[in-house]
Image: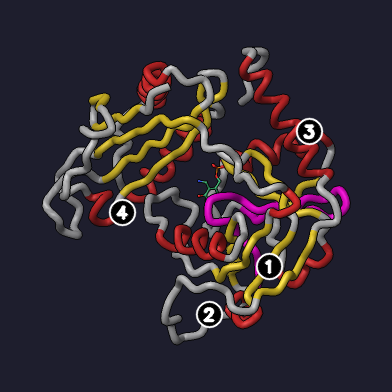
Amino acid sequence: MSEIYYVNGEFLSSKESVVPSEERGHQFGDGVYEVVRVYGGRPFLLNWHLERLDRSCKAIGVENPLSHEEWTELISEAVRRSGEEEAQVYWQVTRGIAPREHLFPQAQPSVTMTVKPLLLKASAKSSEKSLLCIPDERWANTWIKTINLLPNVIAKETAHRFGAVEALFVKSGDFTEGSSSNAWFVRGTDIYTAPANRYILPGITRRFVLQLAQEIGYTVYEQSVALDDLHSMDEVFMTSTTLEVQSIHSVVADRNKMSLLYNLPDIPAQTLLSTPEDPAEIWRSSRNNVAARLQDAFTDAVNKFRNYEEPVQ
Ligand code: PMP
């Protein structure tokens, strides 16, 4: 397996693949991205990723430089060069290379791409996987898959310093999503996940798992779950392209900062990166049947995809 780097029309080695100082992605975070999972040498649910990329580009006024056919060809070529059957492809489209100036430049969008071996699922046993509640202070357009991920990066780091596998954002008392995953809650055979409105990224795995859950016969409500209703849930699980379905054992919060999960005060915090001082476990799972069933269904679908048995989309 070799890692593959692609920059504006050329496949390069990792050493050659440098970002120009005046790249707008580098300077302003002025771009959007996608991550697709490769199973058996082929990108999974690629059309859905490409549709989301179209929406992200349109939202920020960057012309998507490639058609779906051209993206499919480029991604397939990159995967082929990597020689890897199990991988993840990351690519971004930015507003291009131009002298630093806030106004949009007359520049061609930049395309960069990497193919890397799959990052394995977090090594913690499921009995140790917890989420840390973090106030959702992100902007009101988190549905766009922009490369501006500072709040997400800080949230994930805070969660990890605390020993949690992921941050769980809470906005005005309601759960939105994880820092790099969508959140799901199960009560009996009813499944809840936040609606795909402006406040969450509409995950491709979310879309696929929603379909699988309905096929199995679960009732799925695209409704926000309130922090105050968490106690009534039997299961919590997270989904993403690289995680698939990950069941969660407990949810914790910083006792001193619980009020921020309901209302953000006018005064900013001195530091965003704090280690929770007084952690409280606010929920513990009673089972993981539904998440396990969904992961099995996901694996079955992927195996069919690997064997070209049926078109998944
Ligand atoms: N929410 C956020 C904030 C994310 O960054 C991600 C992963 N990029 C997801 C949800 C999950 O999306 P997907 O299933 O498309 O990987």
Separation of marks 4 and 3 at Cα, in angstroms: 39 Å
Q: Which residue is mark 4?
A: 29
Q: Is residue 188 magenta?
A: yes
**Residue 192 seen by the camera:** no
Q: Amino acid at mark 2?
A: Leu
Spatial CA span between label 1 and label 3: 32 Å
Bounds of the magenta segment: 173-195
Q: How is the image coloured?
A: secondary structure
Q: Residue 127 appears at what percent x and percent y? A: 75, 52
Q: Amino acid at mark 3?
A: Glu
Q: Which mark is residue 215?
A: 3
Left or right: where does residue 161 sit relative to residue 29? Answer: right
Q: Quadrant of residue 76?
A: top left
The residue carrying mark 2 is 264
* Three-letter code, disc 4: Gly
Residue matched to label 1: 252
Say which of marks 2 and 1 sits in front. 1
Of marks 4 and 2, which one's residue comes earlier in the chain? 4
Which of pointers 2 and 1 lies earlier in the amino acid sequence? 1
